[in-house]
Image (tube, helix red, strand yellow):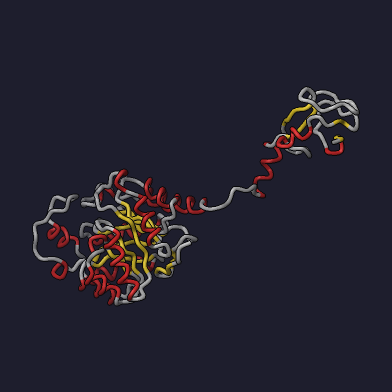
Amino acid sequence: MTRTLNFAGRMIGGEYPPLVIAEIGINHDGVFERAVTMIEDAHTAGCECVKFQSHIIEDEMIYNDVVPGNATESIWDMMNRCAFTLEQEMNLKKKTEELGMIYLSTPFSRASADRLEAMGVHAYKIGSGECNNIPLIEHIASFGKPVILSTGMNGMDSVVRSASILETHGVEYALLHCTSMYPTPYEQVRLGAMQELMEQFFEVPIGLSDHSMGNYTCFGATALGACILEKHFTSDASWPGSDIPISINPRELADLIKGSKAIHQALGGTKNVLEGEQPCIAFAYSCVVTTQAVAQGEAFTMENIWVKRPGTGEILAADFTTVLGCTAVKDIPSGAQLKRSHIKL
């Protein structure tokens, strides 16, 4: 059982259903109204948390022409177009919280972290690209608020180092296994790596930030004990955006939430007979019955007894062999369920 994490009022840990995070990210493509629509659609789907990205370009990067693998323009141009103002981010946070959801955002620089702190966020998400950004992690940790840290593009040594910073600051945190490929082929998802994190950080809630197509791997992760599931989300697959092709839609988000809860409910237990199975036992079990009339003093044999439904008799099929060779203490008609009072041992 993992230690529980109070994440902006939502408890996260093995005893709770996975927290599903709808990562809106930059799927709004810089259009504020789209961002609002996705918040509303995520809420309608039953989602508890939406995540954005906070970009203050001049503090985040120098001018460059690097093109991400899943894009056709430079990261500079993309983030310039998609960055929201402080006022816009505050309005998105307000809208999210008015709907009773958790507003989460990933800061990509010291200035954006300071902006989120000034906005009064309850927790932080640190993306995979910042998992080894030690100065930024130190800065975010200094706020003392819960953190979800994604670990894509980083090995265990890097994760341990970053986690130790959070622990040194007394920050509660969770870790997400992630493969930073868009989309991630199923054979590269590596749920075994998520389990490796669970073994290394056995008291820390562990989850999956998934970039594969559909919900399959998230359902698999839930069965293995994932406490958090993060998927890119869009209201409309026809919108432009580098992450749109790997994003789930409102229907799929609702299915992920419903399915992960169902799988979580199905976990655990022991192999024993439940009280709720008794009605089925009554008709599904078989009992020892006579297949022909048996006279008083006659021995029970394979020729005059067998096992048949329903399971309402005194001697179950499992005890059939214990009756063989015993004798009848009274005349018993054919087709009768044997009783213990019929048998002389």
Left or right: 58 in relation to 235: left
Given residues 148 and 132, the one toward you in this image is 132
41 vs 99: above or below: above
- The image quadrant that residue 147 belongs to is bottom left
Q: Position of residue 261 (x, y in %)?
A: 47, 54
User: Quick check: can you spot residue 42?
Assistant: no
Given residues 259 and 24, the one toward you in this image is 259
User: Quick check: can you spot residue 327?
Assistant: yes
Q: Position of residue 224 (x, y in %)?
A: 43, 52
Q: Looking at the rendering, in which quadrant would you find the C terminus?
A: top right
332 vs 276: above or below: above
Query: Looking at the image, which residue is at 67% across and 36% down?
Result: 284
Q: Position of residue 269 (x, y in %)?
A: 56, 52
Given residues 34 and 261, the one toward you in this image is 261
Left or right: 301 in relation to 165: right
Query: Looking at the image, which residue is at 20% across and 60% down?
Result: 30
Given residues 139 and 258, the one toward you in this image is 139
How many numbered marks does the figure carry? 0
120 vs 161: above or below: below
- The image quadrant that residue 176 belongs to is bottom left
Left or right: 279 in relation to 22: right
Q: Position of residue 101 (x, y in %)?
A: 39, 65
- The image quadrant that residue 83 belongs to is bottom left
